[in-house]
Amino acid sequence: MFFDKLRAGAQGTTSKIILGLIILSFALAGVGSYVTRPVVEVAAVVNGDEISAQALENAYRNERARLEAQLGPQFSQLLGDPAYVEQIRRSVLEQMVEQRLLDQKVQELKLRASDEQVRNAIRSLPEFQQDGRFSNERYQQLLARSGLSPEQLRDSVRQDLSRQMLLNALVGSSFTLETEAGWLDRLSRQQRDAEYVRLPLADFSTRAEPSDEEIEAYYQQQSQQFLRPEQVKINYVLLDAGVASVAGVAEQAVEDYYRANLAAYTRAEQRRVAHIMVNKGADAEQKIQTIAERLAAGEAFAELARTESDDVFSGADGGALEWMEQGTMDPAFDEAAFALNEVGEVSGMVESEFGLHLITLLERRPAETRALAEVRDSIVERLAREDAANAFYAQEQRLAELAFEFPDSLDIAAQELGLDVKSTDYFSTQDAPAEINDPRVLAQAFSARLREQGVNSDLIELGSNRAVVIHVTEHRPAAVRDFAEVREQARELALAAKARELATEAATQLQQAWSRGEQQGWLAQHGLAVTELNGLTRESEEEPVLLDALFAMPAPAEQPSLRSLALAGGDQLVLKLNGVTTPEDTSELLSQIREGQSGMLGQREYQSLIEALKAAGKIEYRRLSAQTDNF
């Protein structure tokens, strides 16, 4: 337990900052956030620097996607709580504000990461990884799709790395004195000898039968334990398309779909090329011409790519890029690559957005169309799903219309659509029937509008071609249950409370007797025995509450060190500490303890830095536009 806390410190906020800061911007808003255009709406202003509402919306959407992947279906239920959604958005904005404050401090201190650090960081970004390795094709394609130039990306990553330099310097200044770590080391290995007596709650339950007056008094005093939650009864009509059937899909429809979507089953021609790139500049054309002349003189393309190309990522592989299809690269580069006819042929100088290139063809795969027989099953399944979705949509629209036109009942809607009106007994938000146990349904079922106006709900879409309309028939507000209804429950609770009271009194009596040295007679009278504990450490396999209590007790002096405590099940424990043994020498864990303590100190210093920057800065939070009105 002791080391768990140290490890938690070492793996806390500070360590995560050191290890993960490079991709922080990507985690918040993705590559596209670097090219977000300025918008009128502003979410916050940090010392004069604006954080746009659009940038916040991008970051919020990415955080939602991350949480959904992490929490699964549970996240959809959490989204039904507006307060939870607001908390996520506020947390994301606060992270963006803290990031902006750090960036401003970095700029003030003139910190700057080197070109080599930037290149290594880009190669490690998960956005550009394929099969665990950096993919130059993904790199080029992602930049082209986002409209981001290599220079813009490098500047953004350099900013992240420069921010990391500031935090490394901050965390690196944290330290723990060897004497402090040594004291913690010896304390962590301390051993304690003790003995205890356990007083089982069951022994007192037989003597704790409460009277009728005591039961009713307990009911009156603890009335909050007998609350009946708000409940409703509802009628509902559930529309469920079920699983799409492939039996009704006509062969002609399959063939028509195949012909209409032939392009989807055709793999375009693919090419693998290599290139040598020269960054744009005053002497770029002269340099690329010189390389072209060396190629014409017989020098190997791959070797020149390694030594002369400014694209260091592909250059390390002789300039080779991944397989590409027409239309996926920069237009000029794409046109030149697909104009090459023979393997080994080299293009003339090509100017793209990224620089000047020489391109050679390495391999070619011809276009290929998959036969109908090969894709027939997938087409049938697709058409079946579409037919089911279309039929469901038509029924869904009609159900919504009928529920609105005849708001007093669901009978007419159910009759026309051939559906059943289902009824529930009373239920609360905690025990709703499984078929309608959905936050969207419960929000309507317990809304004041439906019960006060006596109307049908709006159509509630449940996903997966399922929808429902409900009608609240009865409502029962939260209230304390009548005593007659809960008498047996009150008796059980009163009995348990009285048993705990008797056990606590007995533990106090034993502790007093033990302090006077009269415990043997008391134990014999009650048929209890002492259990010895020798050589216990903080990592011993005992109940955590016992270990926590034992290591919090003072060492015995003139008076015995005694303590009583209640266990989770209601049993009482009277604990006597007999001896404490603390090692004199440090152990091999000293460096680990020192590192853990330094990590916790670094975490506190990081939080102190953020608080100081916020206190010294001028931060203005503004109301956002309609797309983020719930903030």
Image (spheres, grey):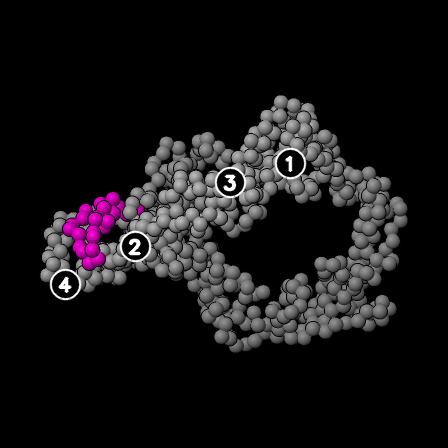
Q: Position of residue 182 (x, y in %)?
A: 50, 71
Check if mark 2's residue and mark 4's residue have beta carbons within 8 Å.
no
Percent x, y of residue 163: 35, 52
**Left or right placement of residue 604 versus residue 566 in this view:** left
Q: Which residues are magenta?
A: 328-351
How crowded pointer 4 is (Cα within 10 Å; few <14, some 14-19, many 20+) is rated as few
610 or 282: nearer the viewer? 282
Question: Residue 334 in magenta?
Answer: yes
**Residue annotated with mark 2:** 365
Q: Which residue is mark 3?
A: 250
Label 2 vs 4, first from the N-terminus: 4
604 or 119: nearer the eye? Answer: 119
Above or below, 426 against 492 in this view is: above
Q: CA distance from mark 2 to mark 4?
A: 27 Å
Looking at marks 1 and 4 on the same chain, the residue that comes earlier in the sequence is marked by 1
Q: Callout 1, which amino acid?
A: Leu
What is the spatial separation of the Cα atoms under label 3 and label 2, in whole angstroms? 35 Å
